[in-house]
Image (spheres, rainbow, N blue to C red):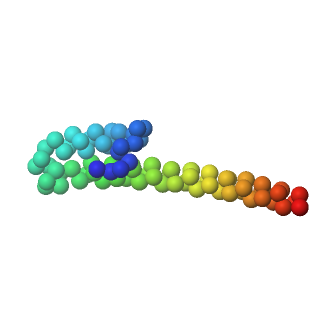
Amino acid sequence: MHPQLSDKRIVCREFIQALDACHVSIWARLTGGCNQEKDSLNKCLRKERVERSTRNRAQAKEQRLKTEQVWKELHEDD
């Protein structure tokens, strides 16, 4: 199972439920009958990961600018 599925706030809940419902049938699971549901879930999780990475990158850039500003102010005092 995907590690993202253990998160408390599940973003792709309807895709997870669809895949779980499909996996009830062992035959569908073994013969590829659930591939569409799995692909939809993977696309949803990828979208969430890309959005999270973009937010984290922006926050890191902002924090880096703040840190550089503080160092600049410290060196101006010398």
Indicate the position of residue 17 as horizontal and vertical percent values: 28, 39
Query: Is 77 placed above or below 17 here?
Result: below
Indicate the position of residue 4 as horizontal and vertical percent values: 38, 48
Indicate the position of residue 2 as horizontal and vertical percent values: 33, 51
- Quarter of the picture containing the C terminus is bottom right
* Location of residue 8 by image quarter: top left
Is residue 40 at all visible to an observer of this figure?
A: no
Q: How many marks?
A: 0
Query: Which residue sits furthest front?
Result: 78
Query: Is 10 placed above or below 73 here?
Result: above
Indicate the position of residue 54 as horizontal and vertical percent values: 55, 54
Is residue 46 at all visible to an observer of this figure?
A: yes
Query: Which residue sits furthest left?
Result: 27
53 left or right, relative to 16: right
Q: Residue at x 36, y 43 (%)?
A: 6
Q: Residue at x 35, y 39 (%)?
A: 13
49 left or right, relative to 31: right
User: Depth check: 40 or 69 in front?
Assistant: 69
